[in-house]
Amino acid sequence: MRFILALLFVLPTLAAAQCGPEAACEIDGGSYHMIDGGAGTKGAPALVFFHGHNATGQMIFRGGIKSEFADAGYVVIAPNGTPIEGRESRRWAGRVGGPRDDVAFVLDVVADARTRASIHPDKIYVAGFSAGGSMAWLMACKAAGHFAGFVSIAGALRAPNDTTDCPNAPVRFLHIHGFADNQVPFEGRAIRDWHQGSVWDSLTLAKRANTCRTHPDRIDMGDPFRCRTWDDSCDAGAISFCEHDGGHGMPRGWTTLARDWFEGR
């Protein structure tokens, strides 16, 4: 009897431990994948990364995210979007009228991940690519106070969304975009009954939340990134827009740029 009772306590722990980069962690409303790069560390930083359209959270561990973040001690959390009918892949609505309250779901993902890994509550960061980049903007818009920094690669805040109080707190936001991106252009595109959103409008919202002046505090003409940054003139937070010559993709060097942004280097 004692053995059975002990087993009942152990089984939930074993089930929780089985999810990771391959097997999904299941919660109400969806699932996510994770790597505990901070295993053995108390209060590790965490990166919540949103995959793009027609992808999954599992796919994000194939590139530089693992080497730049997980191998450097970050807990990397990759939520799954909602299912695409007839496919194994997922999508993000990132706007009013989607099939799920994605903001509430992501906050539940983070809460669940914190029961599985030791995560510092003040070092939880958000990033995403394309539709996932739009999700990064949405989380900044609706849940800014829950995260220490944001990075969007090739995705703006989609419409329709209520931008009355958006972002709802000052943000530290880095936006990366390719000059030749014609799939998600700077101005965005109308798609059926919604719009990809404008990079310029998204940055304006962030500057409003941070109370920054209109023109940047500095311009850095680097290679491959040319960046315009608002920080010294802002009452709080910081914003940077970094352009590269490529198209719709994740440019080489973005992981280092993002990590430097998160860590204030």
Image (cartoon, helix red, strand yellow):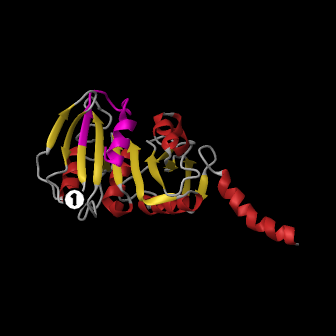
| Image-based side of 70 in relation to 6, left or right | left
Relative image position of residue 156 (x, y in whole percent): 30, 46
Report the quarter where the C terminus lies.
top left
Element under label 1?
A: loop
Q: Is residue 142 above or below residue 185?
A: below
Is residue 21 placed above or below 31 in the rendered structure? above
Near mark 1 (Cα within 10 A), the count class, few <14, some 14-19 or many ≥20, is some
Indicate the position of residue 98 as horizontal and vertical percent values: 41, 57
Residue position for label 1? 236
Quadrant for the N terminus in the image: bottom right
- The residue that appears at 33% across and 60% down in the rendered structure is 144
Q: Position of residue 64 (x, y in %)?
A: 46, 34
Magenta residues (range) = 241-265
Q: Residue at x 61, y 50 (%)?
A: 24
Q: Is residue 108 above or below residue 129?
A: below
Instruction: Work out whether residue 225 or residue 85 is closer to the camera in this orientation and state it.
Output: 225
- Residue at 29%, 37% (x, y): give it: 177
